[in-house]
């Protein structure tokens, strides 16, 4: 008999469908580009981790966390959140200009990371052809307040609609800036270190995906990074082409890749829990 624990979201949520789409990998890279433009937030990462040496591990751990809290049981999601909160609680960063020391789990920093992430997921999904209505976009952001709670935020303080998210970015925009740390993130994302045999694959696959992710940033992101971006129409065409290629890979093959959260969720809840864009179209 199937387990009835649907976790934080469940098969009838917008989150369940959207996070299963492979274009989320491109959205995740966009989120990293965007998050690095907040000086205090990016210093919290670079000063407390070997980002340059273990960036791949960091990316995979972030993806595993998102997969766990999306498709895992309620207990698994709560444990994952507790681990993240416990880690962040012990970390501090220093402003190199003023010498100020600050906690990396300041609510303002956690909120920035959350908003940059959900904005990237939502923007890339819609721009690549995921059939999200305006109402479903708002519903997605409202659902994601449960994820925000897990990392230590008060859900009531987190944007619950696209209008609130837009207002948040408008308010925070003056505090964003290009820094040596954002330049380091930019350099890594453009050309991450790989073993020599994988250099051709990096140029063929990663560089193109990272370029598309960069192109989807808002104009202020391109301005702060001081890097050219193609015209919006060109970016959208490249994104939809990449999304089509990714979606051509059978879901069953993609979902079996470690750590296999979707496979586990379907096994736990039964075949009706299988996420799909078609199911998204049917959600009211």
Image (spheres, rainbow, N blue to C red):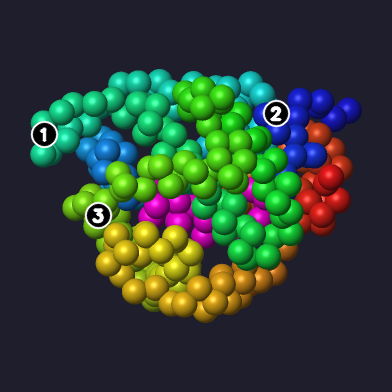
Main secondary structure along the magenta-highlighted residues: helix
Region rendered in magenta: 18-36
Residue at image point 76% right, 56% down: 277
Residue 215 visible? The answer is yes
Rounded to the nearest whole Å, what is the CA distance between mark 1 and mark 3?
17 Å
Q: Residues within 10 Å of mark 3 (few under 14, many from 20)?
A: some
Q: Position of residue 235 (x, y in %)?
A: 51, 73
Label drawn at residue 126: none
Mark 2 lies on a secondary structure that is loop
Q: Quadrant of residue 284?
A: top right
Q: Is residue 173 above or below residue 92?
A: below
Task: Determine which residue is flagged by label 1.
Answer: 98
Q: Quadrant of the N terminus?
A: top right
Task: Determine which residue is flagged by label 3.
Answer: 178
Q: Nearer the viewer, mark 3 or mark 2?
A: 3
| Between discs 2 and 1, the one toward the N terminus | 2
Q: Position of residue 243 (x, y in %)?
A: 62, 67
Q: Is residue 33 magenta?
A: yes
Residue at image point 78% right, 51% down: 280
């Amino acid at each position: 008999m199937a387990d009835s624990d649907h976790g934080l979201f469940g098969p009838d949520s917008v989150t369940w469908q959207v996070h299963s789409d492979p274009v989320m990998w491109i959205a995740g890279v966009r989120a990293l580009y965007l998050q690095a433009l907040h000086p205090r937030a990016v210093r919290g990462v670079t000063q407390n981790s070997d980002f340059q040496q273990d960036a791949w591990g960091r990316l995979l751990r972030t993806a595993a966390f998102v997969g766990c809290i999306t498709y895992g049981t309620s207990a698994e999601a709560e444990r994952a959140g507790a681990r993240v909160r416990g880690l962040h609680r012990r970390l501090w960063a220093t402003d190199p200009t003023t010498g100020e020391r600050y906690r990396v789990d300041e609510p303002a920093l956690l909120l920035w990371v959350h908003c940059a992430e959900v904005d990237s997921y939502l923007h890339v999904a819609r721009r690549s052809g995921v059939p999200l209505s305006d109402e479903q976009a708002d519903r997605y952001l409202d659902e994601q307040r449960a994820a925000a709670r897990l990392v230590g935020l008060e859900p009531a303080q987190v944007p619950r609609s696209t209008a609130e998210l837009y207002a948040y970015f408008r308010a925070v925009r003056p505090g964003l800036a290009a820094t040596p740390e954002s330049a380091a993130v930019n350099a890594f994302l453009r050309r991450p270190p790989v073993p020599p045999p994988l250099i051709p694959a990096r140029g063929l696959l990663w560089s193109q995906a990272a370029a598309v992710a960069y192109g989807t940033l808002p104009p202020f992101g391109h301005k702060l990074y001081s890097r050219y971006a193609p015209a919006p129409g060109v970016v959208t065409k490249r994104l939809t082409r990449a999304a089509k290629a990714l979606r051509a890979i059978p879901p069953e093959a993609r979902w079996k890749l470690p750590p296999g959260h979707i496979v586990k969720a379907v096994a736990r809840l039964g075949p009706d829990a299988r996420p799909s864009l078609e199911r998204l179209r049917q959600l009211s």
